[in-house]
Amino acid sequence: MMDAKLKQESPPDMARKEGMRLLARASFEELEAAWDALGEKPDVSPVRGPETGLVMVRGRIGGGGDAFNLGEATVSRATIRLSTGEIGHGQLLGTDKASARLAAIFDALFQRDADRAAVEALHRQIASRIEAEDRRSAEETAATRVDFFTMVRGDD
Amino acid sequence: MYVAVKGGEAAIANAHRLLADRRRGDRTLPSITIQQVVEQLGLAVDRVMAEASLYDRELAALAVRQARGDMIEAIFILRAYRTTLPRFGYSEPVDTATMKVERRVSATYKDLPGGQLLGPTFDYTHRLLDPSLIDDAAVEEPALKEPGEHVMRVSDILDGEGLIEGDGRMPEGHIMGDLTREPMEFPMARDLRLQALARGDEGFLLALAYSTQRGYGRTHPFVGEVRIGEVEVELDLPELGFAVSLGVVRVTECQMVNQFMGSAKQPPQFTRGYGLVFGQSERKAMSMSLVDRALRTDEFSEDIVAPAQDQEFVISHADNVQATGFVEHLKLPHYVDFQAELDLVRRMRRDYDAARTGSQDGMKEAAE
């Protein structure tokens, strides 16, 4: 069922999905700054939330086997509608409902041709920050890699 | 007759006021912030998240502060908080193979793809108290190096040779259980046992794991690998028809490789125990994987000869919120119960004394 759905994902869905991934990782300051930078503020009405709840995080036995329930995580989500009809969803780990609402607004704006470029710029900004953080973390970890050397028992 | 007793409201209110005062401590010192707890007592925060079974660093830090550093109290508070929230759904299973690895060590292979990455470990420190921390001496920035190749899973290396059992599969048609939705029943399937172990008390699991090493249900373990890092959590959104990422959580995973099993039908191969825990906690993940393997007696037709192999014993006592609730309730008023027992023992004593006096009188008479 899930696999069938995944296969049906069209390229615009993939772009939206990637955008939602990035919006979930955005800080409130990043979202707020992007909102403040919007020339014309959209007319937003709430559909659901913003609200905080739980998602049961699942793992796989042995790392790749059947699923089991690892434990829950807090999640905040919001769904909004723009006056032009687009529906946006925002969902992210944690209890930051204001960020979830702004993420939903940017998800909706992403679907509107006139605003897409601005949202894509926000996506790029978040992506480059995450990339820099991950890069730094990977470099820190790499510096702790063990270089083994063998003590050669020479004949002389 | 049951007699209800009231009273103590003022005492309780004042006790809680006193608790708040002691929690705050010396007012001339600055109060610690939640962010300070998250940043500087991160492993305490991780333990609270793991055993409360709720991933939220800020809320766990708040619980640690509110509980004055009492870990089980903090876990209790966070566990209670989660019952106030609605459940939005179940995530897609996290993929630990694509983890952004911050530490990975293997005790079975020296040279393996990705290498031995020590990360921020206490290992190889001398466990000497560091007086320089008193004066808050400046801390060096971490060293940096060019990252290497993908950090391959050790179980995949052995799996390629067919020398190790595969990742765990549940029997055909098995429906994944959820401890937070159904009461515990024994025998308990492995998926539910793993959920219980993942939120089990670290000290209890550590002691059980240690007992298997000392011969109480020997499993001959090697750490195939321990890895710590961030994994992405995805949730399927039915309204969109695809799964979206909610962000990342840090987890610790342990692949324990145990001595071989084989039968007439199956060639000898290594067996496995699995540990997965919220946050950075390899002691807990390692203990979990040892206990997971010890509990798989039914799969390998092993005799249950030790506590760590007894799933009812292990799972029923692993939850420290339940355990502390039942142990600590003993200090609450039991006045009526105790009065009843006191009456009983007085009656028994009267009967005892009467019987003794009677027999002594008899003996006296016989002597005379």
Image (spheres, coloured by chain):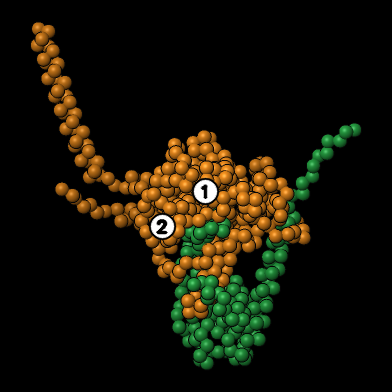
Residue B199 visible somewhere in the drawing: no
B42 relative position to B144: left or right: left
* CA gap, disc 1 and disc 2: 17 Å
Name the element at disc 2: loop
Question: Amino acid under label 2?
Answer: Leu
Residue B321: x %, y % from top left: 41, 52
Please tell me which residue lies in front, B353 or B277: B277
Residue that carries the numbered disc 1 in the rendered image: B288
Residue B22 spot, x, y in % from top left:
47, 52
Residue found at the very far front of the displayed protein: B264
Closer to the chain start, of discs 1 and 2, is: 2
Chain shown in orange: B
Q: In the image shown, does A125 or B169 lie closer to the viewer?
A: B169
What residue type is disc 1 on?
Met
| Quarter of the rendering containing residue B355 | top left
Question: Quick one: quadrant of the C terminus of chain A?
Answer: top right
**Element carrying mark 1:** helix
Name the spot of residue A11 as percent of width and height, x first.
61, 81
Residue B237 drawn above or below residue B285 = below
Point 60% across, 83% down: residue: A12
- Would residue B9 be visible to someone looking at this image? yes
Q: Nearer the viewer, residue B222 or B207?
A: B222
Q: Residue at x 24, y 54 (%)?
A: B6
Q: Residue at x 43, y 53 (%)?
A: B189
The residue at which mark 2 appears reads as: B179
**In percent of the image, x 73 and y 59: which residue is there?**
B149
Label 2 CA crowd tier, 10 Å (few <14, some 14–19, many 20+): some
- Tell me what hue chain A is rendered in: green
Q: Relative to A45, does residue B31 appear above or below in the rendering?
A: above
